[in-house]
């Protein structure tokens, strides 16, 4: 039998150029259906509500405060990571646990490709759930009128952390196909996060900044309101977590039977690239510095992020001087103006008395911890600068409106006497105490005010037994000065404020 | 060809059934059950957790914070031990095993109680490395209660996810400890001799042990 010239030539079938992606997509679809991750997602969602959302609602309606617990301290990662690692370990150990390793090794696709499909399905479920829950969190915050910009970069860090935990857990399961791989991966991840917190709480700089639950310096008091969220540290952490994920997954490609020589070479390259990325991020973290807007890393820093966010301030009046705040703080405007009014009235007409008060960006100082910052009076005409983001807010963290107002008055008077960022000279402290007495803060209660939480460290006078009594030469001089008629006080201040502010006056020179 | 009419196996085609004395047979059954539940591996892991606790206490691994924060790493290790016990309940045979006899509930109960006792023993040995918050009494209460949660998780979620119960409780406890809880259901936050906390933990363990014995871990197609 021959193929004669009259035989019709069968047309050549089209090249199956799209076969590989189609097969990969089908494989992923099958793995998505067979994945165990959806079983655990309701539990994760419940814990997310309990651990990440619920505690955050006790904070003021500002994104930087609402999300500090769940994103700054990494609680969204703690809620997801260990569970994702555990389920990923279970999925990674599936084939060898069921003794079908040889069977799947004989399929058309390399073993590593099959494993990557299983991992990808696990990661897709986990990351999708993470993004949905974080999206829901932000949507709820938006409905509650939370002010500022959401920390998108930190949400991206969380999503990358979920990927990294899924990759690490999967690798554990693939290397050790035991029923105990899942709990070991889950509790190992949890313990790692706890140790990360342990190191992070006490590390303000250096390599430890790369740890996913290290909250030092990553959230600044006015991030997303007066200045942008700095992406430097989030980028470094994404690099770190992404590198670890790539290294963990590509290690599986080095196993015998994972694929052909070329595939194993590619896996070796990806492993090295992942390790290099993670190592580079650690080196970058060691160069990180705390700037006024947050942690910046010179090699990653974009100068465009150094600017302030422009806004139209909301203003009120305190005894005739305008008081202007960022609109995010609008709900606190009435309290701030009411707090400043007595001091503004007291110092009106004196040299250096501010003609307006305006909010300035607050900066986190690791030496001060959560304590507040001093107000400043600068410029000509003088302007009172108020770092409201670092001061007590009425109704937040247990502060009453009276306590917050007392702190604002103290800081205003402190700035007026020129005491700056320290406790001030004895004469400055005496005048400060007298002026506070004049505006209705009795000298006897001032040690308690100075000991209250939220003031800069220079104000703290309390010891383990509470605030000391208002006695001693400073308070004696203050009582003497406060007893003078208001006109005499003003006349003396008008004549001596320059010397007082420069620190040249002694207690004995007070009237 | 038909097998009708054949009522016994031909001589020499099947080995004679091994005749074990009842005590040996019972021990062999228990051993086979233990092996099918990977009890030896579980014991190895519990021993490793004991060593980890010893290291954590000896080298003062602590989370920054008050007394509640200081108990957190030991509590994590205790919950991990509970998870190992719970995952050990997973049976690979499913329906087949149910048809083999009436001893299965007792075997499950024995395995659960014995592994819990082993977990306590391993961690009590590990606690000699330093000062364990709450001491041995709190350790026993915590392990029993969290293991009970793991056993309940095995009944509800299946053996493969039984570890999720202790882990979820650990997370809930972490949040609760930050707020000085008074409910006895957060028993790790209660003093060692607190009756309410002890009753809650014991009740959860009893419920978990009974349910795992009677119902066994949930079988899932994902297993």
Image (cartoon, coloured by chain):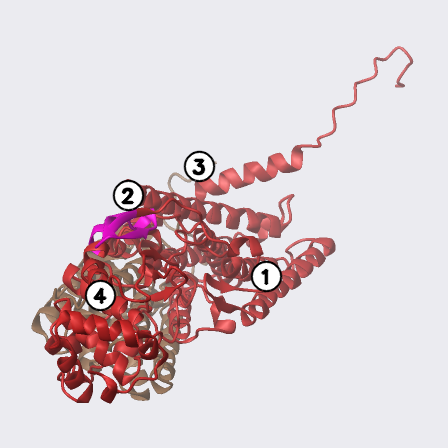
Chain colours: A red, B brown
Judging from the image, mark 4 belongs to the subunit labelled: A
- Viewer-side label of 4, 2: 4
Q: Dot 2 corresponds to which residue?
A: A145
3D distance between C-alphas at marks 2 and 1: 42 Å
Q: Which of A39 and A208 is in front in this view?
A: A208
Do pointers 4 and 2 mark residues of a single chain? yes
Residue at the (38%, 83%) spot, across then down: B55
Q: Dot 3 corresponds to which residue?
A: B2
Q: Tell me, for residue A409, which label it has, or none.
A: 4
Q: Earlier along the polypeptide chain: callout 4 or callout 2?
A: 2
Q: Can residue B110 be seen in this view?
A: no
* Residue B39 x, y percent position in the rendering: 35, 69
Q: Do the residues labelled 4 and 1 touch (CB within 8 Å)?
A: no
Span colored in magenta: A315-335
3D distance between C-alphas at marks 4 and 2: 29 Å
SS for dot 4: helix
Q: Residue furthest top?
A: A6
SS for dot 3: loop
* Residue A167 x, y percent position in the rendering: 51, 57
For the N terminus of chain A, the quadrant is: top right
Judging from the image, mark 2 belongs to the subunit labelled: A
Q: Which of A56 and A383 is in front in this view?
A: A383
Q: Dot 1 corresponds to which residue?
A: A247
Q: Earlier along the polypeptide chain: callout 2 or callout 1?
A: 2
- Viewer-side label of 4, 1: 4
């Amino acid at each position: 039998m021959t193929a004669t010239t009259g035989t019709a030539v069968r047309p050549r079938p089209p090249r199956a150029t799209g076969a590989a992606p189609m097969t990969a997509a089908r494989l992923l679809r099958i793995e998505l259906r067979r994945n165990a991750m959806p079983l655990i997602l309701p539990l994760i969602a419940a814990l997310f509500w309990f651990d990440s959302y619920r505690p955050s609602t006790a904070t003021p309606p500002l994104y930087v405060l609402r999300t500090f617990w769940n994103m700054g301290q990494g609680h969204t990662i703690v809620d997801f990571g260990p569970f994702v690692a555990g389920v990923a370990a279970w999925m990674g150990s599936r084939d060898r646990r069921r003794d079908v390793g040889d069977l799947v090794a004989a399929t058309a696709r390399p073993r590593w490709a099959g494993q990557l499909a299983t991992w990808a399905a696990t990661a897709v479920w986990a990351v999708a759930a993470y993004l949905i829950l974080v999206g829901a969190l932000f949507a709820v915050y938006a409905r509650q009128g939370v002010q500022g910009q959401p920390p998108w970069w930190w949400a991206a860090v969380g999503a990358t952390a979920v990927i990294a935990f899924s990759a690490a857990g999967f690798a554990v399961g693939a290397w050790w196909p035991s029923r105990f791989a899942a709990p070991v991966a889950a509790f190992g991840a949890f313990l790692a996060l706890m140790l990360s917190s342990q190191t992070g709480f006490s590390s303000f700089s250096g390599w430890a900044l790369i740890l996913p639950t290290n909250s030092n310096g990553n959230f600044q008091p006015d991030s997303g309101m007066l200045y942008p969220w700095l992406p430097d540290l989030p980028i470094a952490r994404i690099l770190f977590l992404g590198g670890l994920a790539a290294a963990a997954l590509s290690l599986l490609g080095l196993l015998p039977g994972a694929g052909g020589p070329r595939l194993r070479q590619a896996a070796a390259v990806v492993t090295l690239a992942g390790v290099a990325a993670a190592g580079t991020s650690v080196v970058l973290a060691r160069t990180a510095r705390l700037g006024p807007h947050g942690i910046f890393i010179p090699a990653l820093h974009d100068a465009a992020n150094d600017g302030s966010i422009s806004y139209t301030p909301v203003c009120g009046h305190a005894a005739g001087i305008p008081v202007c705040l960022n609109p995010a703080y609008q709900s606190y405007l009435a309290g701030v103006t009411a707090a400043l009014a007595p001091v503004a009235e007291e110092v009106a007409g004196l040299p250096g008395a501010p003609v307006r008060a305006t909010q300035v960006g607050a900066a986190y100082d690791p030496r001060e911890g959560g304590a507040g910052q001093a107000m400043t009076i600068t410029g000509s005409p003088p302007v009172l600068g108020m770092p409201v983001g670092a001061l007590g807010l009425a109704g937040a963290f247990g502060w009453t409106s009276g306590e917050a107002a007392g702190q604002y008055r103290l800081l205003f008077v402190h700035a007026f006497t020129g005491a700056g960022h320290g406790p001030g000279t004895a004469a400055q402290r005496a005048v400060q105490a007298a002026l506070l007495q004049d505006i209705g803060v009795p000298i006897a209660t001032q040690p308690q005010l100075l000991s209250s939480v939220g003031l800069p460290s220079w104000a703290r006078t309390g010891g383990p037994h509470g605030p000391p009594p208002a006695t001693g030469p400073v308070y004696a001089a203050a009582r003497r000065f406060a007893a003078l008629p208001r006109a005499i006080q003003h006349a003396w201040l008008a004549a001596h404020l320059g010397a007082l502010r420069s620190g040249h006056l002694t207690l004995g020179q007070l009237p | 060809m038909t097998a009708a009419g054949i009522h016994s196996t031909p001589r020499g085609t099947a080995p004679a059934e091994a005749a074990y004395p009842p005590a040996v047979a019972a021990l062999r059954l228990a051993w086979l059950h233990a092996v099918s539940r990977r009890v030896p591996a579980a014991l190895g892991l519990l021993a490793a957790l004991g060593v980890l606790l010893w290291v954590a206490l000896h080298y003062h691994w602590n989370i920054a914070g008050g007394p509640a924060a200081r108990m957190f790493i030991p509590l994590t290790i205790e919950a991990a031990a509970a998870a190992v016990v719970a995952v050990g309940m997973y049976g690979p045979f499913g329906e087949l095993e149910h048809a083999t006899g009436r001893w299965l509930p007792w075997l499950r109960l024995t395995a659960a109680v014995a592994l819990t006792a082993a977990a306590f023993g391993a961690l009590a040995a590990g606690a000699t490395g330093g000062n364990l918050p709450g001491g041995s009494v709190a350790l026993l209460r915590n392990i029993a209660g969290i293991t009970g949660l793991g056993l309940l998780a095995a009944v509800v979620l299946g053996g493969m996810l039984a570890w999720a119960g202790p882990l979820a409780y650990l997370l809930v406890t972490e949040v609760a400890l930050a707020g000085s809880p008074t409910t006895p259901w957060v028993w790790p936050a209660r003093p060692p001799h607190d009756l309410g906390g002890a009753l809650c933990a014991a009740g959860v363990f009893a419920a978990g042990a009974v349910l795992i014995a009677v119902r066994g871990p949930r079988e899932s197609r994902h297993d």
